[in-house]
Image: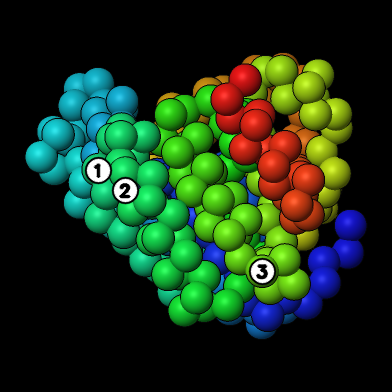
Amino acid sequence: MILEQERQILLVFPHPDDEAFSCAGSVRLYANMGVPVTYACLTLGEMGRNLGNPPFATRESLPEIRRAELKAAVEAMGIKDLRMMGLRDKTVEFEDDEKMVKMVSDLIEELNPSLIFTFFPGFAVHPDHEATARAVVEAVRRMPKEQRPKIWGVAFANDTVEKMGEATINVDVSTVKLDKLKALQAHASQTAWMMAETTKRVEEGQPMSESWLNVEKFYLIQHEDEIDQSINSASL
């Protein structure tokens, strides 16, 4: 699809690297168009599983490593406004619902975005992903219909296509594929193993698709019935 000019874009994801895997290419395209982008990253991913073998980090040092990685990733994506919201990894699901909704509502009121990237409730796998998505959708649902920004939801549960059909938005990001790779590589503490495995497979001559690097897929959550449907999906 051809991207339209947006007034302001807001990303709301719980962990560093969520943005790189889900929408780095699309955001880079928008940044190249001169659209201002704000990223609200809820945690520093301090409970990330990968500490290295042998370990390159401890639980005490990992947050600062991931903070630096996040800054490098958003630079690769062209994001000028990074907000680190200070919640704790793997506890977002336990935050008070109204606190979460207010946090998102405050961002929307300040920034007046026309487009929000986040996860799609019910199809985001991780509990922190789901809690984040629910808060974004509820914050938008409470707005007057004519003032609501569009929401592009990232869904990657195994039954996504079965239950929701194919993604409604497909963005060709092949022209900024190298920027997306830089964003992924910036999160080296969590993605180095994946990059090494990918390189090994290519060197061994194994066929592999680059579609995940060239196309980013989203589901639109915009109208009243779609918002209600997404909230109901989260409880399936």
Question: Which of the two residues, 129 or 64, is positioned nearer the viewer here?
Answer: 129
| Amino acid type, mark 3 | Pro
Residue 122 picture location, percent across and down:
60, 29
Quarter occupied by residue 106:
bottom left
Q: Do tag 1 and tag 2 residues touch (Cβ < 8 Å)?
A: yes
Q: Residue at x 13, y 33 (%)?
A: 58
Per the image, label 1 sits on a secondary structure element best described as loop
For the N terminus, give its image quadrant: bottom right
Comes first in the chain, label 3 or label 2: 2
Can the viewer see residue 25 in this picture? no
Of callouts 3 and 1, the N-terminal one: 1
Tell me whether circle 3 and circle 2 mark residues in contact (CB < 8 Å): no
Q: Residue at x 80, y 29 (%)?
A: 164
For residue 88, the mark is 1
Residue for badge 2: 43
Residue reaching furthest to the right = 1
**Which one is in front, 130 or 9?**
130
N-terminal label among 1 and 2: 2
Disc 2 marks a residue whose amino acid type is Thr
The answer to whether 42 appears left or right of 107 in the picture is left
Residue that badge 3 annotates? 144
| Mark 3 or 2, closer to the camera | 3
